Amino acid sequence: MEVFQVTFILKSFYEHEENNLVVSHCEEFEAESLEDLLEKLGDEDVIDSIDETPVINSSVSESPDEVNIEYVLIRDSEGNIVYRDEDYDG
């Protein structure tokens, strides 16, 4: 098993855009290969297990209309980038 470091971008979307928040979050996953990891990340249970609290704006009383969680960068156990979302510039 190899350990991969996955960077996620969490975004909240509120009725009033000024309340939206964006946070990056890194987490490690074990997988046999990048292909196996991508299959794992496609499982809704994995995405649902990520804490979305950091993008819930506590300064407003409304709840977000949506919280979006996407993986944008994956590094292998040696720190090499093995996946980068084409829209991610971080």
Image (tube, rainbow, N blue to C red):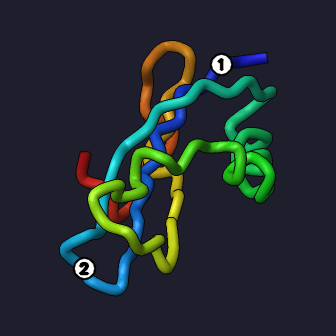
Q: Which residue type does callout 2 highlight?
A: Glu
Query: Marks 2/1: CA distance?
Result: 37 Å
Drawn side of residue 63 relative to residue 15, left or right:
right
Image quadrant where one finds the N terminus: top right
In the image, residue 26 sits, relative to residue 61, either above or below, namely above
Q: Kindly identify the amino acid type of the residue bearing the numbered disc 1.
A: Val
Looking at the image, residue 27 lies above or below residue 43: above
Q: Observer-nearest residue: 52 or 61? A: 61
Q: Residue at x 73, y 23 (%)?
A: 30
- Above or below: residue 72 compared with residue 16: above
Q: Residues within 10 Å of mark 2 (few under 14, many from 20)?
A: few
Q: Farthest residue in the left direction?
A: 18
Residue ID at (74%, 32%): 33
SS type, badge 1: strand
Which residue matches tag 2?
Answer: 17
Location of residue 13 in the rendering, given as x and y in whole percent from the top left corner:
39, 74
